[in-house]
Image: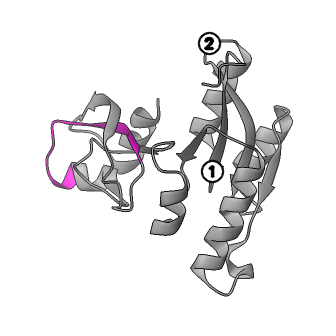
Amino acid sequence: MSAASKTLPVVILISGTGSNMCRMAELMQAGQLPIDIKAVISDRADAKGLSTAKSMGIATTSLNPKAFATRSEFDAALAEKVLSYKPELLILAGFMRILSPEFVAQFSDRMINIHPSLLPKYPGLHTHQRALDAGDQEHGASVHFVTAELDGGPVVIQAKVPLHSTDTAATLAQRVLQ
């Protein structure tokens, strides 16, 4: 946190509904989470989370990866946009793009991801179904620092939920989201 403020300036990257972003914004506005969300940025202009953030008075923008010739050009434009808000922390909350090592290096030790599994189990996609298929007894979510290795950075905190015999990937996803 900067010495001049009581809140940590953050930028949040999303790709969809922004459920985690919304909860963080609610807690911030209630004075229960000492952050200042400077902006929510998406790689999809139609991401529902953008309209949610805007309705909460948070700056929003989107960058279409298809508007760039290369992944490196997209990542450079994204980094420039993020840096324009001067965040001390970058939060990936359902951001569904793999970021280049160059992008990750720019935000080393100040970028975290919310991932729907108990890392190191199930990096990547389809984590809920993978936990069910494996017959796991518990599943959950991890917050971890982002490194160039997909979902491989140091874990900060985890939350666990039990698996039930009646679970589907959808019901498990809903419980993990809570």
Q: Which residue is drawn at 75% across and 80% down?
A: 67
Q: Residues within 10 Å of mark 1 (few under 14, many from 20)?
A: many
Residue that lies at the very extreme toward the front in this rendered image: 3
Please state which of residues 73 and 97 is positioned toward the viewer in this rendering.
73
Residue 33 locus on image (x, y percent) = 61, 18
> Is residue 43 positioned above or below 73 on the image?
above
Residue 116 locus on image (x, y percent) = 38, 45
Please state which of residues 149 and 129 is positioned toward the viewer in this rendering.
149
Query: Which of the image's four quarters has the N terminus?
Result: top right
Residue that lies at the very extreme toward the bottom in this rendered image: 69
Q: What element carries label 2?
A: loop
Please state which of residues 38 and 132 is positioned toward the viewer in this rendering.
38
Q: Which amino acid does label 2 sit on?
A: Gln
Residue that badge 1 annotates = 13
Q: Quadrant of residue 3?
A: top right
Residue 51 locus on image (x, y percent) = 80, 46
Left or right? Give the position of 14 relative to 174: right
> Is residue 3 positioned above or below 57 on the image?
above
Residue that badge 2 annotates = 32
Q: Residue at x 62, y 51 (%)?
A: 14
Q: Which residue is drawn at 63% across and 18% down?
A: 34
Left or right? Give the position of 116 relative to 50: left
Range of magenta residues: 132-145
Q: In which quarter of the image is residue 103?
A: bottom right
Does residue 120 belong to the magenta stretch? no
> Is residue 45 positioned above or below 40 on the image?
below
Q: What residue type is labelled 1?
A: Leu
Q: Is mark 1 on a helix, strand or loop?
A: strand
Residue 69 locus on image (x, y percent) = 67, 87
